[in-house]
């Protein structure tokens, strides 16, 4: 029976490249001269730590990060920006989490959307941080993919392991 998996994964190498490009851009920008700006990626914990001068610079780095992610073909929906907090040195810090995997609520939403299509012989099952979709015909599976792409979900989806 044909099947595929719906996942939400991040290419951490591309994310590292995007962070490095942001740091290079910060070094060349005039409005960041004389201001300490640090952007550190912890690939293991999937957390970015930003430290910079003021609120305007935090917004500027955030916009640069989003634009560089788009250039590197990393969906910016994976970035979850935390609250800005002041430090003892008179600077602002912010934690940016990188979301990977499909949580239970989003998995239930995906399964419900698939079942609402009322396609015959299509089944969706939640497996850890992914959703497995099986069906009798490849055309039905492709219709599910098109329907999910048309939805405006708050996380990027990839479709892997298509088996016939």
Image: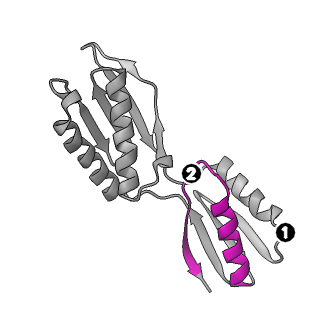
Going by the image, does 19 lie left or right of 128?
left
- The residue under the point 73% across, 78% down is 140
148 part of magenta stretch: yes
Seen in the picture, residue 43 relative to 151 is either above or below; the reply is above
Quarter holding the C terminus is bottom right
Seen in the picture, residue 5 relative to 98 is either above or below; the reply is below
Q: Which residues are magenta?
A: 137-162
- The residue under the point 43% across, 56% down is 10
Residue 46 in view of the camera: no
Q: Which label was assigned to residue 155? A: 2
Going by the image, does 104 lie left or right of 73?
right
- The residue under the point 60% across, 65% down is 6
Quadrant in the rendering for residue 149: bottom right
| Residue 122 x %, y % | 77, 74
Going by the image, does 127 lie left or right of 15?
right
Q: Which label was assigned to residue 118? A: 1
């Amino acid at each position: 029976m044909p099947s595929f998996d719906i996942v939400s994964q991040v290419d951490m190498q591309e994310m590292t490249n995007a962070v490095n490009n942001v740091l290079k851009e910060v070094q060349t920008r005039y409005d960041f001269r004389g201001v300490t700006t640090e952007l550190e990626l912890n690939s293991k914990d999937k957390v970015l730590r930003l430290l910079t001068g003021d609120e305007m610079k935090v917004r500027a780095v955030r916009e640069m990060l989003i634009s560089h992610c788009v250039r590197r073909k990393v969906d910016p929906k994976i970035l979850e920006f935390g609250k800005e907090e002041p430090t003892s040195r008179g600077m602002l810090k912010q934690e940016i989490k990188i979301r990977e995997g499909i949580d239970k609520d989003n998995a239930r939403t995906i399964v419900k959307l698939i079942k609402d299509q009322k396609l015959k012989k299509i089944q969706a099952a939640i497996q850890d941080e992914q959703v497995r979709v099986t069906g009798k015909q490849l055309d039905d599976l492709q219709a599910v993919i098109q329907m999910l792409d048309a939805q405006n979900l708050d996380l990027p989806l990839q479709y892997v392991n298509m088996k016939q």
